[in-house]
Amino acid sequence: MSLPAIAADRVDPEPFVDVKVAARFLGVKASWLYDQVRVNKVPSYKLGALRRFRLSELEGWALAAGRANGDQAADGPPDGAAR
């Protein structure tokens, strides 16, 4: 069985990364990230036995979670504050 041809002008989608890369990107332990996955708090994909992530989705989730918790760091410092 052969795979269907892919259009030459198709842009490759963002690659999936494993939990180690995702945890490093977020600055957390892999075990914490797995705990968040277990309770459906972070965006992830189950590919067979593997759990995978897209960094752009994790970034969006982290920024939204920061804003929901009143974290000004998600949007930057308040007006007049030093960076």
Image (tube, grey):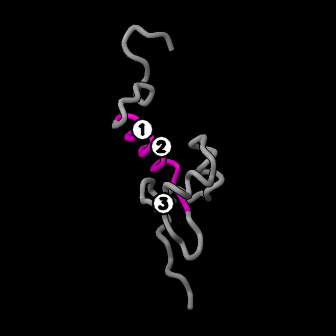
Q: Distance between the residues labelled 3 and 1?
A: 16 Å
Q: Distance between the residues labelled 1 and 2?
A: 6 Å
Q: Distance between the residues labelled 2 and 3?
A: 12 Å
The quadrant holding residue 49 is bottom right
Q: Label 3: few (<14), some or many (≥20) within 10 Å?
A: many
Mark 2 or mark 3, earlier in chain: 3
Range drawn in magenta: 52-67
The x, y position of residue 56, in whole percent, is 48, 47
Give the secondary structure at mark 2: helix
Q: Determine contact: label 1, label 2, CB under 8 Å.
A: yes
In the picture of the structure, the residue carrying the numbered disc 3 is 44
Question: At x 56% / y 58%, what residue is drawn?
Answer: 34
Amino acid identity at mark 2: Glu
Q: Identify whether 79 is placed above or below 54.
A: above
Classify residue 54 as left or right of residue 21. Answer: left
For the N terminus, the quadrant is bottom right
In the picture of the structure, the residue carrying the numbered disc 1 is 63
Q: Label 1: few (<14), some or many (≥20) within 10 Å?
A: some
Q: Identify whether 8 is placed above or below 14.
A: below
Magenta-drawn stretch, dominant element (helix, strand or loop)? helix
The x, y position of residue 40, in whole percent, is 42, 59
Question: At x 47% / y 43%, what residue is drawn?
Answer: 59
Q: Determine contact: label 3, label 1, CB under 8 Å.
A: no
Q: Which of 59 and 2 is in front in this view?
A: 59
Q: Nearer the viewer, residue 13 or 69?
A: 69
The quadrant holding residue 76 is top left
**Seen from this angle, which residue lies furthest top?**
80
Can you tell which mark lies on residue 59?
2
The x, y position of residue 77, in whole percent, is 43, 18
Give the secondary structure at mark 3: loop
Give the secondary structure at mark 1: helix
Amino acid identity at mark 3: Ser
